[in-house]
Every structure is written in C-alpha cells, then in structure tokens.
Image (cartoon, helix red, strand yellow):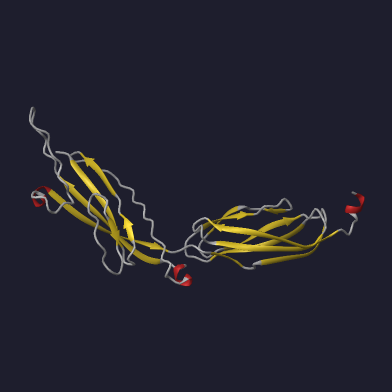
Amino acid sequence: GLLPLDLAGKKEGADSGTEKKIGGESLTDATGRRERAHVKQITLTPNSQQTLNVIYVPSFDENLPVLKAQRLQSRSFKLLFGCSLVDVAHEGGEDSVITDPMDKNNDQHFSNTLQLVQRCTAQVCTSYIGLLNKMVNLGDCNIDTIKKSVVQVVNMSDLPTEVEVHYNTKILRFRQVRFSLSARQSLNIQFDFIPSKLNPDYRKEVTFVNLKNPTDEQYLTIRANNIDRNGITLHN
C-alpha cells in the first residue's frame, strides 16, 4: 500500500528537551526556549524514493560572548521519521484509515508503523562585521573638488557575509554599496567626497548593515572642513 511519512524536526542541546508530537506541539530546547517544530507529510508509492531538502536555522544565543559567537560551533538536531502502512481497501469495501505514526497510544503502533531518528550536526556561528576606523577626517576640502578616501570593513566571523552601505547625501559617493566578505576577510571600500557649499564642521554618518545579521550595524562618521580656495561661491 501507500506509505505516508511524517517528518518532525527537533533540535538537540546539552540537555534533552521535550520531543515533538504530531500536531504541532512546541519544543523546549536546551536554553529553555519554546520553539515550534515543523511536520511535513509525504506519500511514497512502493519501491519509490523522494529527496528531502532540509533547512536548518539555528537560534541566536544571546548569552554567548561575542568573541566566542564569531567562531564556528557544533550544534546538533534530529529528524524524526514516522512511517505507517496504508491497507488498500478492496473494491466496494470501506475506506482505509491512516494511523498516526507518531501516536504511541495507537493499538496498531508496533504492528504497522516504523520510527527512525536521523541525527544531524551543523557548524554555526553568529555573523559580525567591524570597521577599522569609526571616523574619517578628510580635513580641508575644496568646494566642487573630489576628495577620495577609503574605509576598511572587516568580517570578524568564520563564515562569509554580505554588507550594504546606507547613506543619505549627494556629496558622498561609495564605489560599492553592496559587497561580499569571505570568512575573516577585510576589504577597503573607496568613496568620493564632493562638497557643494561652505561648512567648517561637516559631519555625516554612514551605516554598514550586515545582511547575515541585521542587528549588526556599524557606523562611520565622516568629517570635513569645506572651504572655497578658488572663490567659487563668490562667482556664483
């Protein structure tokens, strides 16, 4: 007959939590947090097979020190497979009933069901980026004259990440507003500054957003003394 297969995902920790039962009960992980388990049911015909893609999204451990969280840590989780046989109803007979393979109270549990546990491990870390300098002072900058500079962005974690640069001004122009960083890689990001009016104390904040960890934002302050050595403002 057909084989309905119920899959329940469960995380593992240093201490055992409660196992998932079919129907969507929540799990308790090693840190005491309640998490929703996922159940997927598929039907296999005899002598058939199906490939399952598993996506593992580890939870953020806010108690882990940043320096340790940046390094790869081994975490484990389980895939629970529950399989039950379906009797093919004879012509004109009553419909067959599919038993719950995860229900241990079912009288037929040990006669027509099978449970398998696949233990899995993954290497995970929390993504963090950093800026070598939090402030760039461009000094004296002539109006309508390009001043070039760079800022060094560092991937402080053991996995690759992507970064976006956010700013709201027309007189700054970054050569790259989105870029990738390999594990532990640093990259010099060039930018141009073209002042348009006098300002002896120009300041602008630029935000670097870690797309692998949206809570991780780094801020760069750009300062300059915008002057007019060529008398452009007088002619205008």
Tell me which residue sits at (41%, 66%) in the image: 61
Q: Residue 62 lies in what quarter of the image?
A: bottom left
Residue 51, compared with residue 195, is above or below; it is above
Residue in the picture at 70% in, 62% down? 222
Residue at the image point whose x is 49% and y is 65% from the top: 157
Left/right placement of residue 193 relative to residue 179 reads right
Point 29% across, 59% down: residue = 27
Image-based side of 15 in relation to 87, left or right:
right
Q: Count up the numbered dots.
A: 0
Q: Residue 68 is drawn in which quadrant?
A: bottom left
Residue lying at the far top of the rendered structure:
92
Image height of 223 relative to 197, above or below: below
- Residue 223: x and y, percent? 73, 64
Instruction: Please state the horizontal and vertical placement of residue 168, each as a whole percent of the image.
Output: 67, 52
For this view, does 5 lie left or right of residue 33?
Answer: left
Find residue 70 and report its horizontal and vertical position in percent: 47, 67
User: Could you say where residue 121 lies in the image, as x and y percent from the top left?
Assistant: 33, 61
Location of the N terminus by quadrant is top left
Q: Is residue 193 left or right of residue 32?
A: right
Tell me where residue 85 sits by quadrant. Answer: top left
